[in-house]
Amino acid sequence: MKLKIGLLISLVLILIGALWSLCLVQASSELSVLSHSAEMDFPTRLIFDISAQSDVNINDIRLHYQINRTELARITSEIYIEFTPAETVSTEWVWDMRKTGGLPPGSSLDYWWTVADVSGNSIQTSPTEVLISDDRYEWRSLTEGEVTIYWYEGDDSFSSELMATTQDVLARLDEEAGAELENPVSIYIYANSADLRGSMIFPQEWTGGVAFTRYGIVTIGIGANPVDMEWGKRAIAHELTHLVIHQVTLNPYNDLPTWLDEGLAVNAEGELQLYFVNELSKARNDGTLFSVRSLASPFSTDTNESLLSYAQSCELVRFLIDEYGQEKMFELLSTFRQGAGYDEALIRVYGFDMDGLDTRWRTAFEAMAIP
C-alpha cells in the first residue's frame, strides 16, 4: 500500500513538474520581436528601430553591433535604449555620425537586438547585415582580380583606364617591395571633389582622396578630363599603396614610421612631380633637410614643410630599394608586422638604425644631380 502511495505521489510530482515546465515555455514564448530594421541616411545617420511585445511589461532593450573591418580583436558595441516600459514597445535609436565620425561607402556592419521583460524572459534576434551605401548616385562597377572600381559618371573606357592604373600599381608594389593585397579592395570614384566631400563628415576643403585602410576602401574625386585623370591616377596609386602596406604590416604593437608609409605611397605615383623636386633642391642648398628620425612622426601642416617631408620620404624609400633591393624592403615590412620598433626593424634588416640611414642617404643624395 505504501509503495502504491509513493508511486502515486511521484507521478503527481512528475506531472506538476511537467506542467510547470510547460508554463515556463509558454511564458517565454509570449515575448517576441515583431519587427526591426536599419536605415542609412548617408553619410550622417543610421536609424535603428524595433517593435516588440510581451504579456507583461518589457523593461530592457539593447542594440548590439559590430563594424566589419580589419581589427586585431572583434569589438561589439552595446547601446541601452531609453523607453517607457510597456507590454508593446516601438522605439528607435539614431546613430549620429556627426558626433562619432562616419563610415565609408561600401562598408558594412552586423547588428542584433536583445529584449527582456519584467518576468525575466529574454529574446535575441539573429545578426543582420547593413550595407553602408551612398544612394545619391547610380553606381556602376568593374572588377579585376581583388579590385573593384565603382563609378557613376564616365563611360567604360574611363573605368578601364583607372583599373589599368590599379593593376600597374599592384604589380609595381610586388616588384619593388614584395607587397601584395591580402584582402579585396573597393575604389569609389566620385565625379569631382565636391561630390567626394559630400560623402564625408566635416571634410577638409582640400580633400581629394581618402584611404580607409581598415575597411579596404578608397574614395577619390576624379573628373573625366585629361588633367583630372592624370591627377586621379597618381591619387589612386598613392591611396592604394596605403591599403596594401597596411594589410601586410598590421600588428597590435606599432605603426610604420611616417617616412616609410608615405614614402612608399609617393614612390608608387611614379616620377616625382616638379614641386617636390624644387623643395628637395631648395632644402639641400639651404641645409634644411629633415632628419630621418623627425620624419618618423606625423608631418607638419605647413605646406612647404609638408611637401619636403613627402618628397624626402620618397627619396629615402627609393634609396633603400635601389641600394639594398626589393627583398630587403619586404623583409623590413615583415619585421614591422612582427611588432618591431623603428630602429629595431632597421637594425635587424639593414644593420643600421634611423640615424645610420640618415647618414647613408644624405651621402648618396648629395652626390645626386638634381636642379
Image (cartoon, helix red, strand yellow):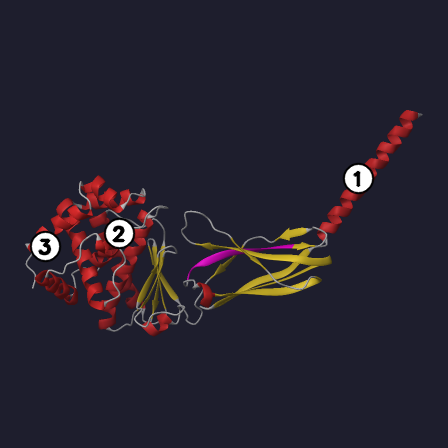
Q: Residue at x 43, y 64 (%)?
A: 101
* Contact (Cβ within 8 Å) of mark 1 with mark 2: no
Q: Amino acid at mark 1?
A: Gly
Question: Which three-letter amino acid code belongs to the residue tagged 3?
Answer: Phe
> Label 3: which residue?
365
Kindly report the secondary structure that dominates the magenta region of the rendered protein.
strand
Q: Secondary structure at mark 3?
A: helix
Q: In the image, is residue 71 above or below residue 137?
A: above
- Relative height, residue 370 to residue 352 (above, below): below
The span shown in magenta is 106-115
Q: CA distance from mark 1 to mark 2?
A: 67 Å
Whether residue 267 appears in this view of the structure is yes
Task: Say which label, 1 or 2, has the lower sequence index.
Answer: 1
Element class at badge 1: helix
Q: Is residue 69 left or right of residue 34?
A: left
Q: Which residue is mark 1?
A: 17
Q: Nearer the viewer, residue 58 or 363?
A: 363
